[in-house]
């Protein structure tokens, strides 16, 4: 017995079908805002490629996260029925709907050559999931802002989270985004405790690459062209039965931007070089928020950089990332930490214990590893400050501000 909301864009009927509203999910508001999102995507792509579209929205009390699956003329969404009650959860739901709707063009019609015709019986490998999913992630949030549903700061915060997520994942220096795409079936869909050290998400890096490519094209063309033009041209060229190869997509980017991307492609897409954000920030009049120095006299807690869980009262290590004091000390996943400097550490007391030490202090950790007791010496560090938060550069020239305006609110 679903609740059905209908709206029309360009003479085409759309339906938001909510299963499980339970008097909690604001369906009327969601349908109104979905119409705004649809109109923005239609503006960007230039048309609607279907006769009718259905958003099937499954709402439960237990789905705290969310997810979706795109179809050619519809999408299935999963969300918590309380999603419309707070701004952050509502923007998250709108972002999910925007992402899946963008797939109507970018994946269901414009797709990597390996994915068409679709084979639902076997794993299909492609190096272009960063385009299919990552670029879609980039546009899903950008469309919310262009629709007037999110503020500039909320968009920048979302993009900052993608950048920070990538830059704090050691695996970015091990696995390229094309490899992450190709290995999705054996790595991304089957993560383990060491995944962060040896792999990346093609969603995350793909979204960041979408941002960098967009800015690079705008810089090269003086704002006359953008990634929007790349996506439209790719759709017009490759949305038939065959699809595109990685080289063909790159050729469209270079043609639209009128520039060579050989070194960028080799290092950022086929390779594992660190990404350079300087050009994008300069082009769009942005900067990373300056890192604040610790205040004088303010205590800084000790930090090991590992993740733990409370396993029936036992403090067990669940992840150890490269570049952290825990990694340098030799702590392993599934180690049980019993004591620090001879004092018992209980699972619910770790934060309090760390507050008694300072960065630079040495601690002897009593650890049980596969039922063998051992002592591991570790040197505490300081938790790295957040350094990937985008903000408007107050010193940006007028031309850069205009570029940013055209990026955020294209005509």
Image (cartoon, grey):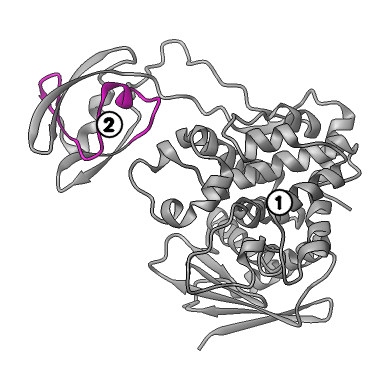
Quick one: 224 or 308, which is closer to the camera? 224
At 72% from the left and 67% from the top, the residue drawn is 242
Q: At 74% from the left edge and 52% from the top edge, which residue is drawn? A: 249
Magenta region: 320-344
Q: Which residue is tagged 2?
A: 351
Provide the residue designation for mark 1.
Answer: 142
Provide residue 240's location: percent of width, then percent of height.
76, 70
Which numbered dot is residue 316?
none
Q: Is residue 90 left or right of residue 184?
A: right
Spatial CA distance of label 1 from label 2 is 38 Å
Which x, y percent locates residue 164?
54, 36
- Residue 315 image-quadrant placement: top left
How many labels sit on residues? Answer: 2
Q: Is residue 209 visible?
A: yes
Lower position in the chain sequence, tag 1 or tag 2: 1
**Could you say which quadrant of the image residue 220 lies in?**
top right
Q: Residues within 10 Å of mark 2 (few under 14, many from 20)?
A: few
The secondary element bearing badge 1 is classed as helix
Q: Position of residue 258 (x, y in %)?
A: 88, 40
Q: Decide whether residue 139 is among the magenta residues.
A: no
Q: What residue is shown at x 62% (from left), y 53% (from top)?
A: 128
Give residue 310's position: percent from left, percent from top: 21, 44
> In the image, 59: left or right of 218?
left
Q: In front: 411, or 6?
A: 411
């Amino acid at each position: 017995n679903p609740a059905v909301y209908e709206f029309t864009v360009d003479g085409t009927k759309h339906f938001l079908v909510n299963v499980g509203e339970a008097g909690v999910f604001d369906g009327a508001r969601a349908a109104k805002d979905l119409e705004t999102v649809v109109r923005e995507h239609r503006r960007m792509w230039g048309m609607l490629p279907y006769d009718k579209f259905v958003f099937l929205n499954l709402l439960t009390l237990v789905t705290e996260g969310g997810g979706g699956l795109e179809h050619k003329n519809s999408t299935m969404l999963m969300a918590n029925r309380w999603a419309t009650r707070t701004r952050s959860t509502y923007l998250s739901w709108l972002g999910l709907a925007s992402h899946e709707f963008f797939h109507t063009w970018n994946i269901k019609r414009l797709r990597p050559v390996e994915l068409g015709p679709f084979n639902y019986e076997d794993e299909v490998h492609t190096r272009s999931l960063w385009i299919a999913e990552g670029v879609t992630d980039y546009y899903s949030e950008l469309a919310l802002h262009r629709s007037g549903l999110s503020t500039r700061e909320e968009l920048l915060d979302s993009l900052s989270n993608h950048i920070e997520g990538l830059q704090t994942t050691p695996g970015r220096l091990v696995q390229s985004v094309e490899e992450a795409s190709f290995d999705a079936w054996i790595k991304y869909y089957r993560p383990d405790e060491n995944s962060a050290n040896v792999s990346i998400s093609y969603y995350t890096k793909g979204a960041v690459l979408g941002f960098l490519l967009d800015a690079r094209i705008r810089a090269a063309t003086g704002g006359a062209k953008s990634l929007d033009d790349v996506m439209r041209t790719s759709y017009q060229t490759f949305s038939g039965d065959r699809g595109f190869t990685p080289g063909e997509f790159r050729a469209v980017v270079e043609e639209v931007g009128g520039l060579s991307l050989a070194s960028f492609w080799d290092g950022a897409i086929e390779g594992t070089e660190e990404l350079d954000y300087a050009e994008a920030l300069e082009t769009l009049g942005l900067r990373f928020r300056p890192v604040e120095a610790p205040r004088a006299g303010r205590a800084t807690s000790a930090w090991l950089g590992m993740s733990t869980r409370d396993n029936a009262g036992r403090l067990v290590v669940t992840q150890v990332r490269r570049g952290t004091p825990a990694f340098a000390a030799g702590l392993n996943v599934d180690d049980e930490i019993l004591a620090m400097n001879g004092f018992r550490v209980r699972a619910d007391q770790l934060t309090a214990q760390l507050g008694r030490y300072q960065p630079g202090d040495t601690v002897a950790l009593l650890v049980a590893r596969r039922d063998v007791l051992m002592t591991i010496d570790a040197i505490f560090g300081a938790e790295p400050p957040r350094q990937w938060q985008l903000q408007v550069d107050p010193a940006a020239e007028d031309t850069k501000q205009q570029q940013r305006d055209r990026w955020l609110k294209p005509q």
